[in-house]
Image (cartoon, helix red, strand yellow):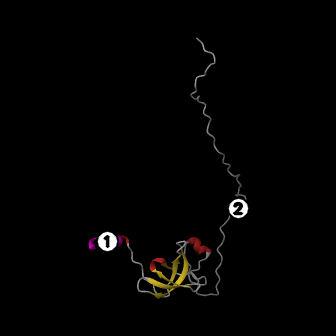
Amino acid sequence: MTASREKSRDFHDATAHTLAALKVDNHILIQDPDTSRWSIPGKVIEVGPNRDYLVRTENGKEFRQNHRHLLCRVPFMPGTPGPATTYAEAARGQQATPIKNQNVTATPPEPPAQAPADELVQQPPVRRTRQRRPKNTKATRQQPKRSCHKTD
């Protein structure tokens, strides 16, 4: 009996992963049991002994969930400022530099130089037509013609 248990434990441990422990006040997503999507946001309020957590959702409901059904997330707050980039910096692929003096306004990037009007020649749009295959002029094999009259 112990040999079969050890064998099954070895098979289980070959693909099993340990999940990182969640802490109190971690923001998480709960897996919806009906749709299997990670769509219910919540917050850990208590840690249990067997990988179970007491979670409070945004509407005030509390659930005790196994760690398997919880996913740690980093909340995005719309009011927090991110690294500001101007259009020119984004086009060049550069990061924004911090502005030391807040009274200084950034100048808008200069538009690209345009060609003179006489060089701009409008060309008619290219019409694409479907090319047809040439008809097969080679005679196909046909049945010999039958005549109604027998000739003897």
62 or 72, which is in the foreground?
Answer: 62
Residue that label 1 marks: 10
Which quadrant would residue 6 be assigned to in this image? bottom left
Q: Is residue 115 above or below residue 136?
A: below
Residue at 30% from the left image edge and 73% from the top image edge: 5
Farthest-out residue, front: 1
Sort mark 1 into few (<14), some (14-19) or many (20+) by Cα contacts within 10 Å: few
Residue at 45% from the left image edge and 80% from the top image edge: 67
Reading the chain from its start, which is encountered first: label 1 or label 2?
1
The x and y percentages for residue 60 are: 57, 86
Query: Which residues make up the magenta segment?
Result: 1-12
Q: Is residue 127 above or below residue 48?
A: above
Mark number displayed over residue 151: none
Tell me the kind of residue under disc 1: Asp
Count of labels shown? Answer: 2
Q: Name the image quarter holding the N terminus.
A: bottom left
Q: Is residue 5 magenta?
A: yes
The x and y percentages for residue 117 are: 72, 60
Tell me the kind of residue under disc 2: Pro
Q: Is residue 115 above or below residue 12?
A: above
48 or 70, which is in the foreground?
Answer: 48
Residue that label 2 marks: 116
13 or 124, which is in the foreground?
Answer: 13
Q: Is residue 111 above or below residue 147?
A: below
Q: Secondary structure at mark 2?
A: loop
68 or 133, which is in the foreground?
Answer: 68
The x and y percentages for residue 12 are: 35, 71
Farthest-out residue, top: 152
Q: Name the image quarter holding the C terminus.
A: top right
Q: Is residue 55 magenta?
A: no
Q: CA distance from mark 1 to mark 2?
A: 76 Å
Residue at 61% from the left image edge and 76% from the top image edge: 86
